[in-house]
């Protein structure tokens, strides 16, 4: 299950982790949300606005994200590195912005899993990021795990609610 996409090489000054979220909704529905690099605010609740830079589409696209107030960050510039509609893989990098997550890179993959209740979608999101000099690896990972965990739970809640509507 832990596919080849989630084995990043870490430099000594980096940390990383991976989070898993099982969602009771079809993979096609979950993927339709995850693949929308131009619309992260659809489920990422820390995102206030996201604006695509003109002149792109597809791989290499850049978005300017503004996050909600109350976080140790205001803006983030992010680039789409990979979007595979067959393998259900999405990779993006943080390439700038007003925050402390330097060289952040996130990989998300979707997988179908069947249990007694039916077919579910398993989302794996892994990341790598530089550890700021004044921080520990543990604190950096705890901070990122919190954000990614919130995003994954929000994704689950939204797509499960949508699946519920479609089935009634
Ligand atoms: C994502 C994941 C993360 C986003 C982080 C980790 C961020 O948008 C927030 C706070 C920060 O300090 C950094 O998939 C940054 O969006 C919410 C602005 C990048």
Image: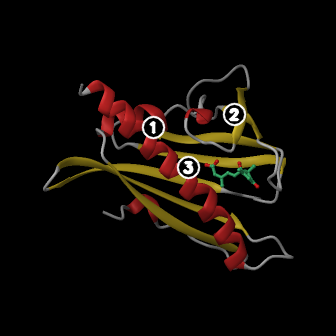
Question: In the depicted view, which residue is nearer to us: 104 or 155?
Answer: 155
Question: In the depicted view, which residue is nearer to us: 71 or 85?
Answer: 71
Q: Which residue is mark 2?
A: 62
Which mark's residue is nearer the viewer, 2 or 1?
1
Element under label 1? helix
Q: Give the mark nearer the N terminus: 2 vs 1.
A: 2
Which mark's residue is nearer the viewer, 3 or 1?
1
Give how far apart the Cα atoms at labels 3 and 1 are. Answer: 11 Å
Q: Which residue is mark 1?
A: 158
Instruction: Point out residue 142 in the picture as x, y percentages from the top left corner.
Output: 65, 71
Element under label 2? strand
Label pair 2/1, CB-CB below 8 angstroms = no
Is residue 20 visible in the rendered image? The answer is yes
Which mark's residue is nearer the viewer, 2 or 3?
3
Residue in the picture at 63% in, 56% down:
147
Q: Give the mark nearer the N terminus: 2 vs 3.
A: 2
Quadrant position of the C terminus in the picture = top left
**Is 106 on the left-hand or right-hand side of 55?**
left
Give how far apart the Cα atoms at labels 2 and 3 are. Answer: 20 Å
Instruction: Point out residue 109 in the picture as x, y percentages from the top left corner.
Output: 41, 50
Residue sticking out furthest to the top: 55
Give above or below for 70 relative to 159. Answer: below
- Ligand 1 near label 3 (Cβ, under 8 Å)? yes
Give above or below for 148 relative to 27. Answer: below
Is residue 30 visible in the rendered image? The answer is no
Residue in the picture at 81% in, 70% down:
132
Residue in the picture at 55% in, 38% down:
43
């Amino acid at each position: 299950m832990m596919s080849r996409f989630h084995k990043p090489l870490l430099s000594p000054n980096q940390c990383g982790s991976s989070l898993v979220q099982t969602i009771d909704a079809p993979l096609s529905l979950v993927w339709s949300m995850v693949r929308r690099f131009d619309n992260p605010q659809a489920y990422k609740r820390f995102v206030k606005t996201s604006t695509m830079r003109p002149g792109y589409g597809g791989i290499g696209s850049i978005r300017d994200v503004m996050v909600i107030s109350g976080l140790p960050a205001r803006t983030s510039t992010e680039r789409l590195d990979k979007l595979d509609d067959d393998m259900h893989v999405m990779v993006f990098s943080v390439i700038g912005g007003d925050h402390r997550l330097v060289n952040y890179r996130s990989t998300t993959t979707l997988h179908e899993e069947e249990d007694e209740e039916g077919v579910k979608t398993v989302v794996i999101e892994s990341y790598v990021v530089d550890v700021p000099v004044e921080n520990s690896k543990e604190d950096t990972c705890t901070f990122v795990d919190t954000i990614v965990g919130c995003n994954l739970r929000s994704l689950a809640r939204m797509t499960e609610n949508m699946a519920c509507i479609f089935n009634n």
